[in-house]
């Protein structure tokens, strides 16, 4: 793919998605080249990347060839193929290739309430702006789809580009989470899940589950939440709601479904079911009956 860089307009309609793409580029920087290349094609704030700058938007930079350095918040990182720089607004940084080596970079810039909320909720943190994820075919494909959409700029291309940015964010977050966690964590979580599934009609007994796995309750809670973003109790409740949906598809009452799943209070069960599914158990049953009658015609 030939090198290119774009700074993009966006409309009020584009902004309704909560994320808009402001810039993207695919540039190969040969050895002993002034950085950034094509300097006159960048707005002023972006030209100072090698000396230091502060952005008002988010950027993701992915290095697929070459070597360089990245500096931010008093730390310096060695950049290699597969390095990802995640740059939030308001944080000073600078990066550049090693002069006699150069590099090949992909980047995308974006802003909006959706990604700001992700950052605010800790999906990404100002404490973690550098990732060593290696060359990842899915991320490369995300970038290439972004570039192709920007090149053609068909109607609603911003929506298509931003869906790829969200996918890119998800891939970075997923790969980093998996890389950080030892394989035995997966076995611990899988064992806990299996024990909870086996007792979905009863109550959750975390001390018993933790004892069978060989951990303290607090350690089990910590590992489970880190790996799944849910506590064991939250996961167990979701299991019960999923099972309730299956039970209600059969010819049993809401009261009986609640009783089978260990809920003594039918009204509490109904409120919990609606909070997780958006409909009451009775509405769920009506939806299933309606679907079945249409299929039988």
Image (cartoon, rainbow, N blue to C red):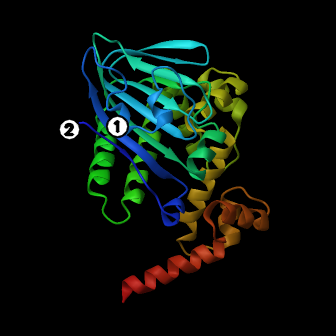
| Spot occupied by residue 189 in the image (x, y as percentages of width and height) | 55, 32
Residue projecting furthest to the top: 100
Res 181 visible:
no
- Drawn side of residue 37 relative to residue 21, left or right: left
Q: Residue at x 41, y 51 (%)?
A: 8
- Drawn side of residue 87 relative to residue 106, left or right: right
Against 192, is 234 above or below?
A: below
Against 75, is 216 above or below?
A: below
- Drawn side of residue 78 relative to residue 123, left or right: left
Q: Residue at x 67, y 63 (%)?
A: 273
The residue closer to the viewer here, 286 or 138, is 138
Cα distance in 3D space between marks 2 and 1: 18 Å
Q: Is tag 2's residue or tag 1's residue first in the polypeptide sequence? A: 2
Mark 2 crowd level (few <14, some 14–19, many ≥20, 10 Å Cα) = few
**Where's the C terminus, which quadrant?**
bottom left
Q: Quadrant of residue 278?
A: bottom right
- Drawn side of residue 96 relative to residue 273, left or right: left
Res 107 visible:
yes
| Spot occupied by residue 107 in the image (x, y as percentages of width and height) | 38, 36
The residue closer to the viewer here, 279 or 10, is 10
* Callout 2: SS: loop
So how many labels did they put on this image?
A: 2
Mark 1 crowd level (few <14, some 14–19, many ≥20, 10 Å Cα) = many
Against 159, is 116 above or below?
A: above
The residue where tag 2 is placed is 2
The residue closer to the viewer here, 184 or 50, is 50
Residue projecting furthest to the bottom: 297
The residue where tag 1 is placed is 139
Q: Quadrant of residue 41?
A: top left
């Amino acid at each position: 793919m030939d090198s290119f860089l774009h700074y993009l307009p966006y409309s009020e309609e584009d902004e309704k998605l909560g994320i808009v793409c402001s810039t993207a580029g695919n540039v190969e920087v040969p050895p002993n080249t002034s950085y950034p290349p094509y300097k006159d094609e960048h707005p002023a704030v972006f030209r100072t990347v090698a000396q230091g700058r502060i952005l008002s938007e988010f950027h993701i930079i992915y290095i697929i060839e070459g070597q360089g350095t990245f500096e931010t918040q008093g730390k310096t990182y060695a950049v290699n193929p597969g390095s990802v720089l995640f740059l939030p607004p308001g944080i000073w940084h600078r990066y550049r290739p090693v002069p006699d080596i150069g590099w090949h970079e992909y980047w995308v810039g974006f802003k909006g309430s959706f990604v700001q909320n992700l950052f605010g909720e800790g999906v990404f943190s100002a404490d973690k702006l550098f990732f060593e994820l290696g060359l990842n075919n899915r991320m490369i494909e995300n970038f290439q789809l972004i570039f192709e959409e920007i090149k053609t700029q068909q109607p609603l291309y911003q929506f298509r580009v931003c869906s790829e940015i969200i996918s890119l964010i998800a891939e970075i977050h997923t790969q980093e989470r998996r890389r950080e966690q030892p394989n035995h964590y997966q076995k611990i979580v899988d064992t806990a899940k299996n024990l909870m599934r086996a007792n979905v009609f009863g109550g959750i007994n975390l001390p018993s589950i933790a004892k069978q796995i060989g951990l303290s309750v607090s350690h089990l809670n910590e590992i489970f939440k880190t790996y799944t973003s849910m506590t064991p109790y939250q996961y167990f409740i979701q299991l019960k709601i999923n099972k309730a949906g299956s039970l209600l598809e059969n010819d049993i009452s809401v009261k009986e479904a609640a009783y089978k799943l260990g809920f003594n209070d039918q009204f509490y069960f109904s409120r919990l079911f609606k909070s997780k599914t958006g409909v009451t158990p009775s509405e769920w049953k009506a939806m299933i009956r309606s679907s079945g009658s249409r299929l039988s015609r």
